[in-house]
Image (cartoon, rainbow, N blue to C red):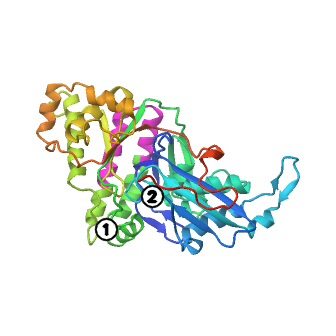
Amino acid sequence: NIANIKYWGKASVELNTPTNDSVSVTLDQADLRAVTTVAMSKSFTKDRLWLNGVEDEKISTHKRFRACVDGVKKLATDRLGDDDKVVLTKDEIQSMHVHVSSYNTFPTAAGMASSAAGYAALVATLAKLMGAREEFPGQLSTVARQGSGSACRSMYGGFVAWNRGGEREDGLDSMAEQIATETHWPEIRALILVVSADKKGTSSTSGMMTTVRTCDWLQYRATEIVPKRMEEICTAFLEKDFATFGKLTMQDSNELHAACLDTYPPIFYMNDVSRSIVRLVHAYNAWAGGGGGDEVIRAAYTFDAGPNAVMFTLEEHVVELGALMLHYFPEFGNDGGEYVNNAEYFEKIKTYKLDPSLLEATEKVGPTPETGNVKKFYFTKSGPGPQSLPTREANLDPKTGLNTYTPKK
């Protein structure tokens, strides 16, 4: 999921609860996803996890991993066989170890919500395996939250809020709530420009803790600014008001990174390429408004804790927007190869004829077209929450429970 109103700052590090509400769009798993397989067996001697084909030797004692595994175990029910007889009791499940293999089809730890996708997939898969039964609606999202805060929002599709809670000492009121399904606004599109696939220099958790400690106005944002924005952007999404939705998305992204700059020492997630994309989007919107200074918001950027740009737009403008970005961030080689995730979309943006007046307007602020500044384009839309995949796509050997996933070279 990609947040439109950002979560930045923890109210409780122990419970992994936020200082403010947030809301996001869950993206389509046909384009970007975490694929997670979980097995449990009485023969397993310890919990094990392979991420992107590499085993994490310390995972069995990792606080966030343990919170998710143990949290789902508490909700486990008896497993029934095909004849409806109990083959595994919920008490037996408590003492069993799990093996997990998970990989992402997009960059990991690069500010693209990979941890949110991974922990949501983990909790959803554990829940199915263990027959977990919620004691109240949204309880599994509170378990996912303990793995990665934003993971609670990935438990649902479409437009999803994370209510910060704060009334309960156990944090169980800090949970996700679906505002609208992925089919509510089917024209919404997202274009993601991967500026860097490298692991970010400052982790989100570390950055948040420093910002909370040193940014004087962060609490004002949480109590005075965010509540109003949440109300406005949820209304805008439900009413399919892209102008309001887009402006609030951009304003909140800018405010997140302003808070990072106001952190001491300052945190820099965006880079020069990121900022050039911001300028291009504003120039594009100004051109759409007739060039007289008033914007008509056709595109809206947002940046999480990293340099990679996510741009929301509507279906009617997504080819034009993609062609504009491809003009300034051209593909490697002659055919694009793996540069754009969708071949049909790549062909459309490659052959689209940009209006000369648009190029004139953007050349004043845009970078010199150069390969390498952007590593990949992802074209996607809103999608559902966790989905079950066929057994043939499993990442664990069903006989040994060992990892079978090998990353592509």
Q: Nearer the viewer, residue 16 or 270?
A: 270
Dot 2 lies on which element? loop
Q: Is residue 244 magenta?
A: yes
Q: Position of residue 218 (x, y in %)?
A: 35, 63
Q: Position of residue 209 (x, y in %)?
A: 39, 70
Residue under pointer 2: 20
Q: Position of residue 31 (x, y in %)?
A: 46, 41
Q: Is residue 229 magenta?
A: no
Say above or below: 387 vs 284.
below
Dominant secondary structure, magenta: helix
Identify which residue is drawn at 59% across, 57% down: 122
Any mark on residue 380, and which?
none
Please state if 377 lies on the left or on the right of 282 as rendered: right
Please indicate, yes or no, whether residue 388 appears anywhere in the rendered image.
no
Q: What residue span does the magenta drawing correspond to?
A: 230-255
Tag 1: amino acid: Asp
Tag 2: amino acid: Asn
Gap between marks 2 and 1 measured at Cα: 15 Å
Q: Quadrant of residue 214?
A: bottom left
Q: First in sequence, mark 2 or 1: give its number.
A: 2
Q: Position of residue 129 (x, y in %)?
A: 70, 55
* Circles 2 and 1 in contact, beta carbons < 8 Å: no
Q: Quadrant of residue 210?
A: bottom left
Q: Residues within 10 Å of mark 1 (few under 14, many from 20)?
A: few
Q: Residues within 10 Å of mark 2 (few under 14, many from 20)?
A: many
Q: Nearer the viewer, residue 124 or 139?
A: 124
Residue under pointer 1: 216
Please indicate, yes or no, whether residue 51 appears anywhere in the rendered image.
yes
Identify which residue is drawn at 84% across, 46% down: 82
